[in-house]
Amino acid sequence: MIKTLARSIKQEKENFRIPHSVQDVIPIRRIWLDGIFQAGNAYSRSYRLTDINYAIASKADKTSMLLDYSELLNALDSGACAKITINNRRVDRRQFEQELLIRPQEDKLNEYRQEYNDMLRSHAASNNNVVQERYLTISAHKRSIDEARAYFQRMGSEVTARLGQLSSQAEELDASARLQILRDFFKAGQPAVVPFNMEQRAKRGHDFKDWFCPDSLEFYADFFKSDVRWGRVLYLQNYASFIKDDFIMELCRLDRSMMVSIDILPVPTDEAVRELQNKLLGVETNVAGWQRRQNNANNYTANVPYDMQLQRKETTEFLNDLSERDQRMMYGLVTVVHLAGTKEQLDADTESLLAVGRKHLCQLSTLRWQQRDGLDTVLPYGMRRIHALRTLTTESVAVLMPFKAQELNHTNGIYYGQNAVSGNMIRIDRAQLLNGHSFRLGVSGSGKSMTLKCIAGIMTPDRGRIVLNGRVLFDSEARIDLPPQQRRVGYLFQNYALFPTMTVEKNILCGIRSGSKAEKNAALTATLHRFRLEGLEKRYPAQLSGGQQQRVALVRILCSQPEVILLDEPFSALDSYLKWDLELKLSDFLENFSGPILWVSHDRGEVFRNCKRVCILDQGASQGTFTLRQLFHEPETEDAARLSGCKNIVEAVPAGSAVTLPAWGLTLNCGKPVPADVRQAGIRARHVMTVPEGTPDAFYCTVERVIQDVFTTIVLLRPEGAADGAPLLRMELERDDWRRLNRPEGLWIAVQPRDILLLK
C-alpha cells in the first residue's frame, strides 16, 4: 500500500465506542470560534464557495474552467485531505417571506404591495425551493491548534487565489456558520429560537452539540432515521472508463435535501512515480515470465495476453501523465446522503440516484452496516470513515465538476425573474452588485432621453418622484427639485460635450471639484495614468479621435464622483466599425465604476452585449423591467417582442394548448395551456423552418418575395389560408440553405411549440 494512504488510514483510525446519546454519535470533539473543528484525530476548516456559470458556458470556456479547476486541485497540499460538498438545502418559507416580501405601510399603496407579495408566493410555490451551496473542507493532522491555525491560514490564501481564477469566491466559515449547516441538515424546518453563542452556552454548561443534534438518530443495515425523516448514504463503487462532466450536477438535481461529497487525498508526485515504476516493473516481469514459459514450450508465436497488455498500457499512460502532463495522483471517493419524509419516498429517491449512476455507466451502491461511517464521511466534518478509494489523476477528479450556475439571491433583494438553469428565483439588491447597470430600451420618441434628462436635472418632470440611493432628487408633491450640480449624476452626451477651447487636462480638472491646487494636480496625474491618457494632456478636443474624446468625457464624469452614470445613445452617430471598437473600450472603461449605469439605446444588439436588466419604454410609460432571458426568450408584450427583434406578430385567440391566428387561417400548437389574456402571438424569423410535406403541425406557404441580406436570405411567405391584407410571414435562412432549396414557389413550414411567443 502506498505510504500516503497507509498513513492516512492509520491517523484516522479510532477505537470503537458505543454511543450513549445522540451527541456521542457526532464525531466533533472541539470547536473554536474562528471555525476550526477537531473531528476525530484531525483539525478541519470549511469555506463556502460561490458558484460559477459552468453549465451554460461554451465548450472553450468549459475547457478553460476545467484547467483552472485542475490547477486548484494540484495546489492541494499532500499532507491534507480535501472534501468538496454540494448541499441541497431547502429554503425556509418563513425566512423567505421575512426577507423578500414587502411589509405594509401607511401610504395607501398596500394593495400594490399585496399584489407583488402574492406574485412572489405563487412563484415560490411553483419553484423547487432548493438552494445549492458548495463547501470546501480541508483537514489535516497537526500537533496543536496553533499549528493547525497557521497551516489553514497558508492554505486558505492559496485556495482563495486559485478559486479567483475560476471566478469563484471562498468565504471562511466561522463556528456559527459551520454549525448552521449541520442544523439545517439535522433539524430542517426547525428555526433556532436564538442564534448560536458558544460563550453563553459554555457559561450555562450546555454542549455545543445540543444546538444542532436531532432528538433521535437510529442506524439500520442500509438506512438511518433522524427524528421523523429517513436517510440513506450511498457511495460510488465502480467508475466508468469515461465520465462526463455533468455527472455530479445530475446527482444533485434531485429535489430533496441531500449532500454529495467528493473526498480527495493528494499523493506526493515523487512517491506516486516510485509506486508506478515499481508496478510497471512488476508488470514487465510478469510479461517476461510468461514469454519465457511460452518459449520453453516451443510456442514462439504466442501473443501476450490482453489483460497483461492492458495493464502495461494503463500503467505506462498513468506514469506519463505524472511525469510529462503536470498531473498528480489522487485518491478519490464520492459519497451521497439523501433524506425523505417516508421510507417509501426514500427508496424511490435511491432508485432515481442509482439510475443516474447507470446512465453514466457508474455504479452507486448503498453502504451496508456502514451508514454511520458514511454519514460521518459525507457531512462536512472533515473526516473520511469509508475507504472505498479510487486511484485517479488530477483531470479525472476535475471531471467530477461541482459547479453549475451562479445564483443571484441577495438578502432583501428585489425579484427579477427565475434562473433558467436552477429554476430558483433571482433576487437582486443592486447596491450589492459590482456594477448595478441598467438599460432603457425603446423606439424613437418613446421617452428614453427625456428620462435621463429628468434624472440629471436638465428637464423638470410634470409630476412624480426621482430617488437615487435613498436621496430624493425630485418630488412634485414635496416641491423638491435639486439643481443638476447637487445631484451627483454623470451625464455622457452623444457629442461628449467637451469644452472646445480647453485642453484635455483642463477638461478633466473641471470634474475635480474638491481639494487644493496641488491635490487636484496629483489627482489629474493619477487619472491620466490610470486611463492611459498620458501624452494627450495638452491636446484640444478637435485634435482627438472619437474614442479619445469619449474616454476624456468619461474620465471627467468619474472625477466628479457621481453616484450614477447616464449614457444617452453613445454610439448613434458612428459608423459600424468605429462603433464596435468604441463599445469594447467603453465596456472595459465602465468596469472601473462601481455605481449604477443607465444606458439608453434603441439598438437591441447593444442591449444584449452590455446589460443584464432592461426597462422598455413606450410613449413615456414603462412596459416593465426584464432580464435578458425574459426579453429575448419570454417577452410578454408586443413592444418587448418587437424591440427584441421579433418580426412576425399577429392577432391570436387562445384555444386550450394552442393559439388560433385568424389573419393566417392557422391554429398552432403551443405545447402548454395558453393563458386567457393572450392577445397576440410572435414568431421570430429564424424559428420559421422548412419541413417535408406531411410533417405534423406543418402548413403550406407560397413564396411572395425573396430579399438578399448581407449574410442571410429573407423570404416573405403567405400562408395558404391567409386573409387578404394579412401580413406576410418572414423567414430568415443562411444563403447556402436557400440556394439548396432551388428557388421554390412554395414551402411547407413548421414552428416548434416552444418558439411561439405568447403576448398580452
Image (cartoon, rainbow, N blue to C red):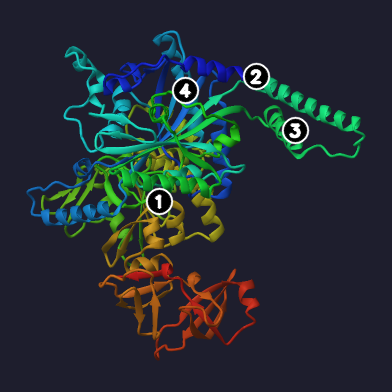
Query: Which residue is identified by label 3?
Result: 312
Secondary structure state at the residue bearing disc 1:
loop
Query: Which residue is identified by label 1?
Result: 497
| Amino acid type of the residue that numbered disc 1 sits on in the rendered structure | Ala
| Amino acid type of the residue that numbered disc 4 sits on in the rendered structure | Ser
Distance from the alpha carbon under mark 1 to that under mark 3: 74 Å
Secondary structure state at the residue bearing disc 3:
helix
Distance from the alpha carbon under mark 1 to that under mark 2: 68 Å
Residue 271's disc number:
2
The quarter in which the C terminus is drawn is bottom left
Spot occupied by residue 595 in the image (x, y as percentages of width and height): 34, 41
The quarter in which the N terminus is drawn is top right
Name the one closer to the observer, 269 or 518: 269
Work out whether mark 4 precedes mark 2 in sequence or the reverse, and give the earlier one: 4
Distance from the alpha carbon under mark 2 to that under mark 3: 19 Å
Spot occupied by residue 32 in the image (x, y as percentages of width and height): 32, 16
Q: Nearer the viewer, mark 4 or mark 2?
A: 2
Q: Is 125 positioned to the left or the right of 603 in the image?
A: left
Q: Is residue 109 above or below residue 185?
A: below
Residue 157's disc number:
4
